[in-house]
Image (tube, coloured by chain):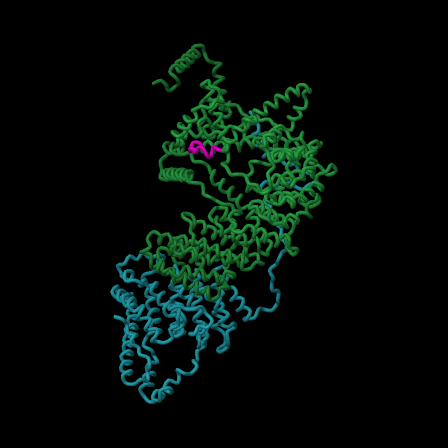
Chain colours: A green, B cyan
């Protein structure tokens, strides 16, 4: 056979990518060629469908390549390829078990491509892919399909929410979970929903309903998947949001500057356009109202029923197959629901009874769950035996300090939620532990003390009450809260605003030289000024701070525990004298509080808060939150964490909490880490010059001549140095003169015109 | 100078002589490549260690298995071996392997990249017993169609050659098998580029892709095969004479109604008589349907292809030269077919006037003008 000369050229010409490229440019001229290739595809499909299992690689061009080719140019010839997507779907659904992996992936990819070209609608695509996702045994295919499904759902929800598609998909998932409760197929529904929840594509009640069904299923994996979603899904979502919000900021000025300097190409100008668009989008995003996202726990329709079902099905049921860790997770969810929605599941508390021993594995989690499960509508007599048991089992001189700490912390957490569950003798007993030798126990006991000073000082011994509480008691301000009593609602942080206003007023008056307390008509003037400044200007809402938040630098640990000791120290006489004074003081203080109290209560009713007020209020709130985080700030250690949101879970770590202090001496690293905890990040210590240099290098600027000279290789300068010695006097003089002249002119090139 | 000293040392390192010591292994050279590997087991390919020469039968099977070899020459040589062993076997003895076993390995070779392989394959096909091929036409046709629309021009040509052979061997099966009529005609149109009016014009912008050999010889070949194909499908049937005389003289046709068509009511004597019911296959669409009778084929042809083919042939004739000559064969077949089609229609009209013995009226078979 003589070799034909055209062979090589032909081979180059006759490849599908080349044809694809040509068709893209001019579909009309190449219609015949496309038609031929479409027939080719049809015949190959026929061959394949006749025997799908015996996948023979037919010649140069395989079915895979043809599918790829047709899918890429299908949008140019919609009438020729109108059956194409249906054919692909048929192949995939009928033969996905026997297809070779590459062809299978190509078909999935082509279907997605057709979807992108709008030749196929999302619902059809998802209805094809989803059954395969559930049934296929191939891991790679599952991963691929999962990713494609997710991508498709994201893209179809990108501009506006595609309610129709979401609804059908959610129904499919719901049916998947509920139809067969024993199988682990529901895991796919969970995976998908979790991902979509994280990206805030699905955040409605129906999604939560699917997860609720999942956590009530029979399969352990599915149960735990559902439970985990409720416990961690929202946190995941928040983290995701944070991540996406602090993408690297684009410095538009810099980009523009660079374009001005560098060579102007179309690519560069496009980059500028892109940067502009990004900045614009970000701006718009910033101005948009924050989307209201309810947590999954709030979107549940029937929390009571759900919690009861979970409890009876997975925890009380002796046939439940869950292991301890999984049971703990379910318990966490149940107790969180109970705490959050103030549910009543009475068996729950007796269930805890048998787990509250120090020998129980992961008992701190049980303690945390118990604390979570208690709220102010739980009957105190249900909780009391539990507290008693914790006190008996955990808190004793004989038990290890770690155990005692955990017990005390747990009791504090429970009592913070339901103070009535504690009886007087037990409390006084427990408070005595603040004289213990172990630091952790001391702190825990002090925490309990502080809590009851705040909530119900009457239960404490007289000398334990402390000054503030005593005053409060006498004035009748601190009263025991009765069962079921609700506080009247207010605006969070309003008292801060009031306090701030008061201070401002005092300052002004001090400037004017007036007595600070006197009442006069200035309030009205103030108000008038406020009304003038109805609109919040940028400089107004943070007039003094300019975006910075003041942090109290060195707030000392101010445990009120110590001040009664201080009081006890002075001699009797002085004490008596002091007592009188104190009396008088307290009386005036009492008067003042009496006078002030209605003021605080009525500020929301007497005035209309201007936007400026609200802005200030927000600022004060954030500052208070920051103050609370700074180590040593009052009230952080001892009492229940005020800054914690009601929705946040109580974890075992918090129960163990200060047990770390009793664990013996911390290592140096730990101590350093502990000290660094509250401090903001700080760079390595460096001189100013070094910092400048670094910054310069970072910005990609070049070095100065001086620096260049300093870095010059010594061999290059040696010759010159040697020459210097050999110079004659005249030469030296000339050189010096020239140098002087140059200096005057300002450099070799003459810098002064 | 710190850096320079360091560099000097590094340079020196290259020239230090490795000391050889007694009892110690020699150091590895710098350009040493580690070629050791770990394996759970070592498998040796089995060798046949028989003393007897393999029988011709085993050789035949061996060569059949070699057809899927990677190397072109190996495939070609195996095909040659198969061809000789088939053609040199004693007369009337069966094949070493039945056709149904060999064919699945042979078919992909229709699309083989190598020209030598394809020509050798055609030789092998010609050597195969004709009667065996008839049952395998539905398997062959998709590959031939795939070949006819292939990107590479010479694969197209050889596929057309294979089709020509197949029409020779089993013409009626080709045109009446599932998808054999419409799909194959479509392929012809796309090979010739006659699908649309615009593309059929000689002055059309033939922005043809990968059609390096689209002029002259191959085109003629395609035209002659098209003529053969049309002849097999809708050409004036050779058995028409027989038919006519059956109708004309006494014989069976002279009998009463059910008896005059006895043959129609008998079980057909083909290999797959009920294939048209398509009991086990995929559901077929219009293109994939079987058109078993002349009338069906002619109706479909006149509805879909007649105009395009007439136009194409006309253009080819106008082009003149060899193309024109080649087209004349096809146009002759076409003319006969049209004449016969209209003739049947006329006769039918007459006969339907005469008697009610023929129930089918074929008015719709007339080509639409």
Q: Residue at x 57, y 50 (%)?
A: A227
Above or below, A98 relative to B36 = below
Q: Is residue A707 visible?
A: no
> Is A166 in front, or is A114?
A166
Above or below, A256 relative to B197 = above
Q: In which quarter of the image is residue A410?
A: top right
Which percent across, then down, holds residue A333?
58, 48
Q: Quadrant of residue A267?
A: top left
Secondary structure mostly seen in the magenta stretch: helix
Q: Is residue A501 visible?
A: yes
Query: Which range of residues does the magenta coloring cover?
Result: A602-613
Q: In this view, does A446 lie to the left or right of B119?
A: right
Q: Is residue A30 left or right of residue A375?
A: left
Which percent across, then down, holds residue A753?
34, 18
Q: In which quarter of the image is residue B286?
A: bottom left
> Is A379 in front, or is B75?
A379
Tell whether position A677 is magenta. no
Q: Is residue A750 left or right of residue A143?
A: left
Tell whether position A606 is magenta. yes
Count of numbered circles in the view: 0
> Is A317 in front, or is B289?
A317
Q: Residue at x 54, y 31 (%)?
A: A627
| Residue at the right extreme of this rendering | A398
Which percent across, then down, holds residue B95?
50, 74
> Is B112 in front, or is A174?
A174
């Amino acid at each position: 056979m003589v070799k034909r000369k055209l062979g090589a050229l032909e081979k180059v010409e006759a490849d599908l990518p080349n044809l694809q490229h040509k068709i893209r440019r001019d579909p009309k001229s190449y219609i015949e060629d496309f038609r031929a290739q479409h027939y080719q595809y049809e015949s190959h499909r026929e061959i394949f469908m006749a025997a799908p299992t015996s996948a023979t690689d037919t010649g140069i061009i395989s079915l895979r390549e043809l599918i790829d080719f047709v899918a890429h140019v299908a949008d140019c010839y919609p009438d020729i390829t109108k059956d194409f997507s249906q054919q692909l779907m048929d192949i995939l659904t009928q033969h996905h078990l026997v297809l070779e992996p590459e062809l299978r992936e190509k078909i999935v990819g082509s279907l997605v491509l057709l979807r992108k070209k709008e030749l196929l609608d999302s619902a059809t695509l998802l209805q094809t892919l989803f059954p395969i996702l559930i049934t296929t045994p191939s891991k790679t295919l599952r991963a691929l399909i999962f990713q494609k499904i997710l991508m498709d759902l994201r893209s179809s929800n990108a501009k506006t929410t595609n309610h129709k598609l979401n609804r059908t998909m959610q129904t499919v998932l719901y049916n998947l979970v509920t139809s067969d409760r024993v199988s682990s197929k529901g895991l796919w529904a969970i995976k998908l929903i979790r991902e979509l929840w994280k990206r805030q594509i699905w955040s409605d009640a129906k999604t939560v309903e699917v997860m609720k069904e999942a956590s009530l299923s029979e399969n352990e994996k599915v149960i735990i998947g559902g439970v985990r979603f409720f416990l961690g899904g929202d946190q995941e979502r928040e983290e995701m949001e944070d991540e996406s919000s602090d993408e690297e900021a684009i410095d538009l000025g810099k980009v523009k500057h660079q374009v001005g300097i560098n060579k102007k190409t179309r690519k560069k100008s496009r980059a500028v356009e892109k940067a502009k668009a990004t900045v614009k989008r970000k701006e718009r995003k910033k101005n948009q109202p924050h989307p209201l996202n309810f947590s999954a726990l709030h979107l549940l329709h029937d929390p009571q029923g759900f919690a009861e079902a979970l409890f009876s099905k997975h925890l009380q049921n002796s046939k439940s197959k869950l292991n301890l860790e999984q049971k703990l997770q379910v318990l966490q969810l149940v107790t969180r629901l109970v705490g959050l929605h103030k549910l009543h599941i009475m068996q729950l508390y007796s269930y805890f009874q048998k787990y509250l021993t120090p020998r129980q594995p992961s008992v701190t989690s049980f303690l945390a769950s118990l604390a979570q499960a208690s709220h102010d509508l739980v009957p105190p007599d249900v909780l009391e035996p539990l507290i008693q048991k914790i006190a008996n089992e955990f808190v004793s001189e004989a038990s290890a300090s770690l155990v005692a700490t955990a017990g005390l912390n747990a009791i504090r957490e429970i009592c913070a939620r339901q103070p009535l569950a504690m009886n007087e003798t037990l409390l006084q007993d427990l408070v005595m532990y603040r004289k213990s030798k172990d630091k952790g126990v001391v702190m825990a006991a002090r925490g309990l003390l502080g809590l009851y000073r705040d909530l119900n000082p009457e239960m404490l011994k007289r000398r334990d009450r402390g000054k503030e509480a005593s005053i409060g008691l006498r004035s009748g301000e601190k009263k025991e809260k009765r069962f079921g009593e609700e506080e009247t609602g207010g605006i969070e942080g309003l008292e801060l605003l009031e306090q701030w206003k008061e201070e401002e007023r005092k300052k002004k008056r001090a400037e004017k030289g007036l007595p600070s307390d006197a009442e006069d008509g200035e309030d009205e003037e103030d108000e008038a000024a406020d009304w003038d400044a109805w609109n919040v200007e940028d400089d107004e809402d943070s007039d003094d701070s300019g975006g910075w938040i003041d942090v109290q630098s060195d707030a000392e640990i101010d445990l009120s525990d110590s001040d009664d000791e201080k009081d006890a120290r002075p001699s009797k006489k002085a004490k008596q004298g002091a007592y009188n004074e104190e009396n008088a003081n307290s009386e005036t203080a009492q008067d003042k509080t009496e006078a002030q109290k209605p003021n605080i209560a009525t500020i929301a009713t007497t005035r209309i808060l201007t936007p400026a007020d609200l802005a200030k209020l927000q600022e004060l709130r954030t500052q208070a939150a920051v103050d609370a985080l700074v180590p040593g700030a009052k009230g952080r250690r001892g009492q229940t964490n005020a800054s914690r949101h009601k929705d946040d879970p109580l974890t075992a770590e918090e129960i163990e909490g200060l047990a770390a202090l009793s664990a013996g001496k911390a290592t140096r690293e730990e101590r350093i880490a502990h000290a660094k905890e509250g401090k903001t990040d700080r760079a390595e210590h460096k001189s100013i010059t070094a910092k400048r240099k670094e910054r310069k290098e970072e910005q990609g600027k070049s070095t100065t001549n001086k620096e260049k000279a300093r870095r010059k290789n010594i061999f290059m300068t040696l010759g010159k140095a040697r020459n210097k010695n050999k110079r004659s006097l005249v030469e030296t003089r000339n050189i010096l003169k020239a140098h002087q002249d140059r200096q005057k002119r300002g450099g070799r090139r003459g810098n002064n015109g | 100078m710190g850096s320079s000293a360091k560099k000097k040392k590094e340079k020196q390192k290259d020239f230090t002589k490795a000391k050889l010591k007694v009892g110690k292994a020699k150091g590895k050279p710098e350009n040493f490549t580690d070629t050791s590997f770990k394996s759970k087991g070592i498998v040796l390919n089995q060798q046949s260690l028989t003393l007897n020469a393999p029988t011709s039968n085993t050789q035949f099977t061996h060569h059949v298995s070699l057809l899927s070899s990677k190397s072109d020459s190996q495939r070609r040589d195996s095909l040659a071996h198969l061809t000789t062993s088939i053609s040199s076997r004693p007369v009337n003895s069966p094949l070493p392997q039945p056709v149904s076993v060999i064919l699945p390995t042979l078919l992909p070779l229709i699309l083989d990249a190598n020209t030598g392989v394809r020509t050798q394959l055609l030789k092998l096909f010609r050597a195969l017993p004709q009667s065996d091929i008839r049952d395998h036409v539905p398997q062959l046709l998709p590959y031939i169609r795939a070949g006819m629309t292939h990107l590479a021009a010479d694969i197209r040509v050889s596929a057309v050659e294979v089709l020509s052979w197949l029409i020779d061997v089993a013409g009626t099966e080709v045109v009446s098998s599932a998808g054999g009529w419409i799909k194959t005609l479509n392929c012809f149109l796309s090979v010739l580029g006659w699908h649309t009016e615009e593309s059929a014009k000689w002055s059309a912008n033939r922005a043809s892709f990968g059609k390096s050999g689209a002029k002259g010889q191959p085109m003629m070949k395609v035209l002659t095969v098209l003529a053969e194909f049309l002849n097999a499908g809708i050409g004036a049937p050779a058995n028409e004479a027989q038919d006519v005389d059956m109708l004309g003289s006494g014989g069976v046709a002279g009998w009463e109604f059910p008896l005059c068509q006895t043959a129609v009511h008998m079980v057909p004597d083909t290999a797959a008589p009920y294939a048209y019911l398509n009991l086990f296959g995929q559901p077929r669409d219009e293109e994939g349907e079987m058109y078993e009778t002349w009338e069906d084929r002619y109706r479909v042809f006149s509805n879909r292809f007649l105009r395009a083919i007439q136009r194409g042939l006309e253009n080819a004739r106008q082009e003149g030269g060899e193309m024109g000559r080649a087209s004349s064969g096809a146009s002759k077949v076409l003319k006969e077919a049209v004449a016969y089609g209209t003739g049947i229609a006329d006769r039918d009209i007459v006969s339907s006037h005469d008697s009610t013995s023929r129930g089918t009226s074929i008015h719709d078979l007339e080509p639409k003008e």
